[in-house]
Image (cartoon, helix red, strand yellow):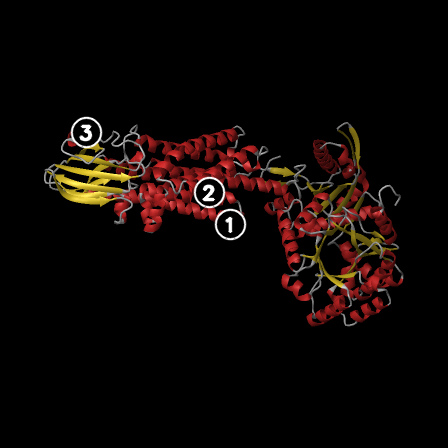
Amino acid sequence: MNIKPDASQSPYWRPLIALVIILSVSATVYALLQHADSLTQSSARINVTPFEHAPTSKTATNHPIPLNGPVAGPEFGPKATWYRLDVTLPKPDSDWVLLLDNPMIDALDVYQVDNGHVINSYFLGDLRAQPDLKHALPHVTFRASGQSAQFIVRSQTQGAPYIPFVVFSQTDFTLYAHLIFFLWGGFVCIVLVTAVYNLILFVGSRDKLYLIYTGYVLAVMITLGVVHGFAHFLFPDNAYHLLARHTISTYYLTAFFSLWFALLYLRYNTDTNPALYKLGKTFAFLLLGGAILTAPLAEYQSAQLFFGVQLLLYLFALYLMARKLKKEFQWARYYFISWLPLYIGAAIGPLMMSGYLEYSFWSRHALLLGVMFEITFMSMALADRLRHYQHEHLRLATHDPESQLPNQSFLAFSLQTDVAEKTQPLTLIMVELTNIQAIQPYITRQGFMELQERLKRHLESQLQGMGIALYPLRLGREHSLSVLLRHDVLAFIGMGHIDHHASILTQQADKLSLQQTIDDLNVNIKAVTGVAEFNAQGDKIEQSINAGYQAIEKAHEQRTQMAAYYAESAQFYERQIILASELSKALSNEQFCLYYQPQVELESLRIYGAEALIRWHHPSLGWIYPDQFIPIAEATGMITPLTRWVIRQSLTDLEDMASTTPSLSVNVSTQDVCNETFCDFLDGVMTARSVSVTSRLTLEVTETTNITEAEQFERNLQRIKSMGVNVAIDDFGTAYASLQYISSHGFDKLKLDKAFILNLATSQKNQMITKATVSMAKSLKIELVAEGIEDEQTVNLLVSMGCLIGQGYYFARPMPKNDYLVWVDSITAPAGTDA
């Protein structure tokens, strides 16, 4: 089941327009550069004669070597080479320019000779002080008395001695220089824009791939800047001379970034076989070491070593790409293409220096142009990769990692993009497969995934067969009628009023159970259904799901197959009126009781404590949930006697539980704490009991009620703490609590709300919030308790984040005191005993 973006998300005309723009710009640039190439084909003719020693009248008669031949060979070494240039000009008495097109030559001595006499001397070279233009384009301007001129040139370098000689008219040279500056400027602009863009991507995503690519393009710019001479315009003289002396080190650095980028881009760091990634990483860091170790060597020495390393790098990169091509990495196609111009450009330079290719503007700048194309294709490759990752991350976020079924995020995303029918009444139908977790250990992982898929299809079919119209959830081109909220809970959106669906399901809920054979095992899956009104607004979806869970809990307590939770209906308001009138009688009629939910140390699984939770069992209305009557109690003022009853009763129960319960938490509202008589009451009930009991008490203050009397709240809070009672903030993260609020009131504990914990394993957002909360709690030296833990994966995640205390259904549901004591005995009993 794949999410495919629809036409509106990836229209075909966008790449078409991009292609037209690229071709138009490329055609314009090509025309300009072709003109630059034509300028190098001067009508002036040059005969070049190399000498191994200073020229004499005897050696000056050696045979001439034409321009397109090797004038001094590709040999490297610390030597001087002499040349005699015999220039034939198309017209006399005009200004001409002789270009010596190798800005990396250390020293160039140029002597214009006439009838055996030196009439002009010029001293060039990248180690000599001179204007930037002569550094970048080593040249001399001369005038000949007739149609011929003669030069003696001495070249001294430790690198490649190859020098192309080109004669221009003064006008043509000025135009040629402008076109070269246009090319260099375009290249530098592309590199800097690419570097800034990738730095922004790195800051936003923290993916080091973008940082490494930034290093790569900057290293390429520096290397080619030295090779072509435009680095004189980018760096101060001292910095340039340092780079010029260590050019091969910049080549090594470029190779290092190139290889590391390839390993990460092609995702060898996540490959199932890590051996190749380790080999590639070792090779990359050897290249980095080469950049450092070859720095003290002369250029001709380090260059000969690098040529061999470069060949190994290219072969290894080809192997890396070929291996991934077998796996049909469609999203990486631009990356594979980007290497072609780079390979071609890197090959042309040595061929030109060796005499196998003629000197021309194109061969001289082949590597630079190849890198420009490589960066262009690589930018497209990175964009392709980003789109692929966004698609992949969206799928990960909206699908269960085990079963690949759509999850709660799929529900939220689909409703964001599909608003047409949100105004009609919708009902959330949640089906809990009660015994699926018990079956899981007895079937294979593949079998369990198949079982979940069968259950999904079975429930969709049965609900539609009952006459329930299911709302189709759409995300991209994927459609689904259900989402997996937990491994054992599937949710459906029914179109219509809750009463309609509740009526149908009350009569036919038994049809949702299923008997199947998986892995040769007959399994009987039982279903418990909860329905609630569904609000499709983004900030209300979570509330609707919580209401659905409460409906399922209600069905469990009532031992029925279906229950409904009414949140915003006429029945709800009628029920509120009844509850308000019955609430005042319930306390005197002893209709309230306390349930206890264990709190556990997540690493050792030892009992940390328990939370006391009030329950109301009405003789005719049955079990009434706290979220139904607590708001009424707060609104009617009944919350004060109710809270005080809970504190008295929990301390009484704690006398029986003290040996097994190190800590007991009781919920109080800020309204309770602000009450003027609350501290006197608390002091009174604690005085009547032993310190071993009262020292275990923690009051959990809810965020839900705004503090109207801040000074009274602060005074009472400090007095409560002086009694030795710990104070915690309950349901942290769901209301207005802030860092300042927590630190200023001196809370001892934080209770992280279950809204962040229930889908912690699948929600990156909740993971980030939880990590931040753990870090904040540690920095303030406050204990953190996570509530709502329902699976082992969540336990492991919390432990890895540093949250070490938690509670939830994974350990135990809330239970009466006697059941709690039996449960504690069963947990703490030694192996082999009857608990």
Read off the residue under disc 1. Answer: 203
Q: Quadrant of residue 465?
A: top right
User: Which one is nearer the viewer's eye here, 793 or 282?
Assistant: 282
Where's the C terminus, which quadrant? top right
User: Which one is nearer the viewer's eye here, 174 or 388?
Assistant: 174
- The kind of secondary structure element at disc 1 is helix
Q: Is residue 710 above or below residue 473?
A: below
- The kind of secondary structure element at disc 3 is loop
- The kind of secondary structure element at disc 2 is helix
Q: CA distance from mark 1 to mark 2?
A: 13 Å
Amino acid at circle 1: Val
Q: CA distance from mark 3 to mark 1?
A: 59 Å
Where's the N terminus, which quadrant? top right
Which residue is located at x 70 percent, y 61 percent? 703
Read off the residue under disc 2. Answer: 213
Upstream in the sequence, badge 3 or badge 2? 3
